[in-house]
Image (cartoon, coloured by chain):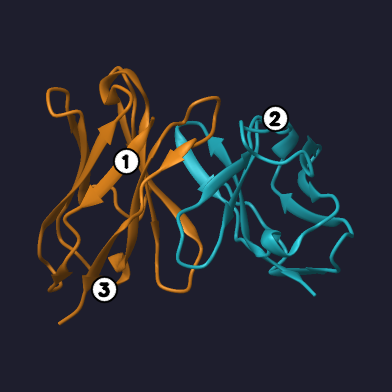
Amino acid sequence: EVHLVESGGALMQPGGSLRLSCAASGFTVSSNYMSWVRQAPGKGLEWVSVIYSGGSTYYADSVKGRFTISRDNYKNTLYLQMNSLRADDTAVYYCARGPLDTSLDYWGQGTLVTVSS
Amino acid sequence: SYELTQPPSVSVSPGQTASITCSGDKLGDRYACWYQQKPGQSPVLVIYQDTKRPSGIPERFSGSNSGNTATLTISGTQAMDEADYYCQAWDSSTGVFGTGTKVTVL
């Protein structure tokens, strides 16, 4: 059974750094495309980043140059390194498997990042 | 940047049909998918590659995509279908979500 569990969310000050983790089970992270999606409080879904099975990475313009997606093949875990955090980065961050058949077929429960002074 | 636009809200009576649109430039030239999100829960994929239903998704959910508009149709809507719905597509290697539609079952 596919399972994704995010962790690492916290209350952060503007300008700080944070790393989110997404532990996967039931499939191999390195053999799949993996994505991060966020949702600000009361707002819609916003795509953040994707890492392809071959290692290529892509980012939304809003996080490009500040966030880095990566994975640990041995731990079967996906990461999102978040630097230079801003108030508008406040959101629940979800990891998801995909795109698979152009969609995100499994999602984690999300982890909350709050950026506030 | 590519944008997908949805109506903010759709109301439907139980047992009736709800249609949710998603508009984007030449959207029909790319695949669209749809997610359902209930309050306090993670999104769930309900339609992928325009028309396909994942395992476990009821047959009352269907999709189409042509021209500039993708449509999610819920036939015989039930109270449990009350949720936010988001369309999604890919613009090159960048993911794009629609603005979201709140479906209310009255």
Disc 3 and disc 1 on one polypeptide chain: yes
Task: Please tell me whether mark 1 sits on a helix, a strand or a loop.
Answer: strand
Disc 3 and disc 2 on one polypeptide chain: no
- Residue A87 is labelled as 3
Q: Disc 3 residue type?
A: Ala
Horizontal and vertical percent for residue B47?
66, 38
Give the color of chain A as drawn.
orange
Task: Please tell me whether mark 2 sits on a helix, a strand or a loop.
Answer: loop
Sort mark 3 into few (<14), some (14-19) or many (20+) by Cα contacts within 10 Å.
some
Horizontal and vertical percent for residue B95?
48, 41
Residue designated by label 2: B52
Disc 2: host chain: B
Foreground disc of the pair 3, 1: 1
Residue designated by label 1: A4
Disc 1: host chain: A
User: Measuring 71% from the left and 41% from the top, which residue is drawn there?
Assistant: B58
Q: Is residue A1 above or below residue A10?
A: above
Determine the image quadrant of residue B62: top right
Give the color of chain B as drawn.
cyan
User: Measuring 32% from the left and 18% from the top, which residue is drawn there?
Assistant: A31
Q: Determine the CA span between mark 1 and mark 2.
A: 23 Å
Disc 3: host chain: A
